[in-house]
Amino acid sequence: MLRRLFVVCSVLGSALTAWSPVAFAEPAPKANPGEARQAAVDESDDPNSAEDESDRPSRKPRQVTPEQSTATHKQVRIIKPAHDGKPVTLDTFCLAANGNLLACVAVGEPESEATDTQPTNSKPGLSFVQTYSPDGKLLQEVSVPFHATAINVGSKGAVFIAGEGKFAKIIEGKLSAVTSTPHIGDYEAFKKKVVAAAKEEMAEFCKSFKDEIKELQKRIDPLEARAKDKALSKRDQAKLTSLKQSLAMQEAQIKAFDRTADEEELVRDRLVVTALGVTDQ
């Protein structure tokens, strides 16, 4: 019977949603070489398969080494980022060379209430870069004048952050060199370019929806005309109902595009920085 090896190697990580807790991990103890073992599971998912075992190609199981059969990391603690004892939104994090955890977090407006499942909404000027020790102790907190969503560390220890089309670095706990990210340049020129491209894109989407609406209406009209003369069969009535529902959905999509055509929102969406790389230069 055709078989394949099923080897569990390691599990590491945690979901970074809202004020998601950050799980630290450390290497697990190595297994005794004598504990190496073979494991195999059936590759066929169909219990009713009529294929005869003699017709299947044979495959020898592969030897599993101790390293492959032992998890490389295990969870040792959970760190929940917070500001003044309240939950925050964890946007991103990285490790410093000394093993400390650097986290970009955002807090909501003072009048906003946050819960464990619903953190406050982030606003410009309420973003921080926090430094935690490996045991979860908050060592430092630097206020950032923009919503930082990307972070990395240079070879000399400087911390680089970016977000909302802005870029900055932190040296010895002090923020410096705040500037626009390379893809922004002149903000007003960037804004015009973004708005023009977004409107063109939305116009194409709207056209496809309008074309679909026309096609749906062509199929609806004959059924409605027939319904005026005599009662429709159950099949035709169900078809007409389905077509009308599809038509309503397409019309709702066009209205949704019209509501999201706010210029500032369009620009804001394209100012987001999702990753940041650092070289020696």
Image (tube, rainbow, N blue to C red):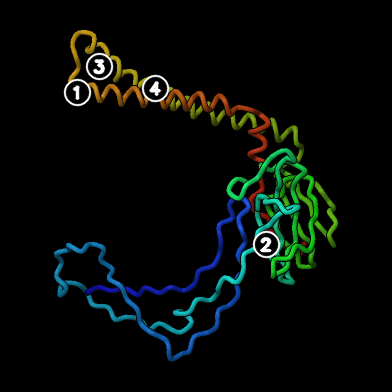
Q: Residue at x 15, y 75 (%)?
A: 54
- Which quarter of the rendering shows the C terminus? bottom right
Q: Tag 2, which secondary structure?
A: strand
Is 263 drawn above or below residue 33 in the view shown?
above
- The label on residue 213 is 4
Q: Which residue is mark 2?
A: 94
Q: Which residue is mark 1?
A: 234
Residue occupying the far top of the picture: 229
Q: Tag 1, which secondary structure?
A: helix
What residue type is disc 2 on?
Cys
Q: Tag 4, which secondary structure?
A: helix
Is 6 drawn above or below residue 191 in the view shown?
below
Q: Tag 3, which secondary structure?
A: helix
Sequence-first disc among 4 and 3: 4
- Which quarter of the rendering shows the N terminus? bottom left
The answer to whether marks 1 and 2 mark residues whose Cβ atoms lie closer than 8 Å is: no
What residue type is disc 4 on?
Ile
Using the numbered discs, state the Cα–Cα distance from disc 1 to disc 3 in whole angstroms: 12 Å
Q: Could you say which quadrant of the image residue 156 lies in?
A: bottom right
Sequence-first disc among 4 and 1: 4
The answer to whether marks 4 and 2 mark residues whose Cβ atoms lie closer than 8 Å is: no
Q: Which residue is mark 3?
A: 223
The answer to whether marks 1 and 3 mark residues whose Cβ atoms lie closer than 8 Å is: no
Using the numbered discs, state the Cα–Cα distance from disc 3 to disc 2 in whole angstroms: 61 Å
Q: Nearer the viewer, residue 240 or 18?
A: 18
Sequence-first disc among 1 and 3: 3
Using the numbered discs, state the Cα–Cα distance from disc 4 to disc 1 in whole angstroms: 24 Å
The 10 Å Cα crowd at callout 1, few under 14, some 14 to 19, many 20 or more, is: few
**Camera-side mark, 4 or 3:** 3
What residue type is disc 1 on?
Lys
The answer to whether marks 4 and 1 mark residues whose Cβ atoms lie closer than 8 Å is: no
